[in-house]
Image (cartoon, rainbow, N blue to C red):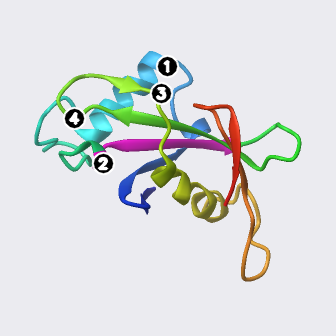
């Protein structure tokens, strides 16, 4: 699913929909974004690091946490996918994505979603 999160936009994927092998996953995401190519002409990337981002989301097995979120930065002009940082902008879209994809049910007008950020080991509530 393609979504905007804060000032960023990118692909939101269920972990189960991606290859479990990290190298295969990264190769797939590079193709999705059209990297490495400064124009990302053959992919969904927007030629800028702010528009070449990925959120990988899954139902959490951690007590008191709804979903786990892994942020991946896909480089525009290099064949690199990295999890060395986190992205709060993409984090903003994780709650709506989790509800939309049925990972957690919507509860009334406002649904709180607790999110474990795999990149940092911290929990956020959206």
Q: CA distance from mark 2 to mark 4?
A: 10 Å
Report the front residue among 119 and 44. Answer: 119
Asked if marks 3 and 1 touch (Cβ < 8 Å), the reply is no
Q: CA distance from mark 3 to mark 2?
A: 15 Å
Residue located beneath label 2 in the image: 50
Q: CA distance from mark 1 to mark 2?
A: 22 Å
Residue located beneath label 3 in the image: 83
Label 4: how many residues lie within 10 Å, few (<14), some (14-19) or many (20+)? many
82 horizontally vs 14: left or right: left
- Where is residue 36 shown, x and y percent of the image? 19, 29
Residue 76 has which mark? 4
What residue range appears in magenta? 50-58
Of callouts 1 and 2, which one flags the residue occurring earlier in the amino acid sequence? 1
Residue located beneath label 1 in the image: 22
Label 1: how many residues lie within 10 Å, few (<14), some (14-19) or many (20+)? few
Secondary structure predominantly adopted by residues drawn in magenta: strand
User: Does 118 sit above or below residue 53?
Assistant: above
Residue drawn 83% across the image and 37% down it: 62
Asked if marks 2 and 4 touch (Cβ < 8 Å), the reply is no
């Amino acid at each position: 699913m393609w979504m905007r999160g804060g000032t960023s936009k990118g692909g939101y994927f269920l972990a189960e929909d991606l290859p479990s092998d990290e190298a295969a996953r990264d190769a797939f995401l590079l193709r999705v974004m059209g990297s490495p190519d400064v124009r990302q002409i053959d992919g969904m990337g927007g030629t800028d690091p702010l528009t070449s981002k990925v959120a990988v989301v899954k139902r959490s097995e951690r007590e008191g946490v709804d979903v786990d979120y892994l942020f991946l930065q896909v480089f525009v002009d290099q064949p690199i996918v990295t999890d060395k940082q986190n992205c709060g902008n993409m984090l903003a879209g994780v709650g709506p994505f989790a509800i939309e994809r049925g990972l957690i049910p919507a509860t009334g007008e406002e649904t709180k979603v607790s999110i474990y950020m795999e990149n940092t080991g911290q929990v956020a509530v959206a």
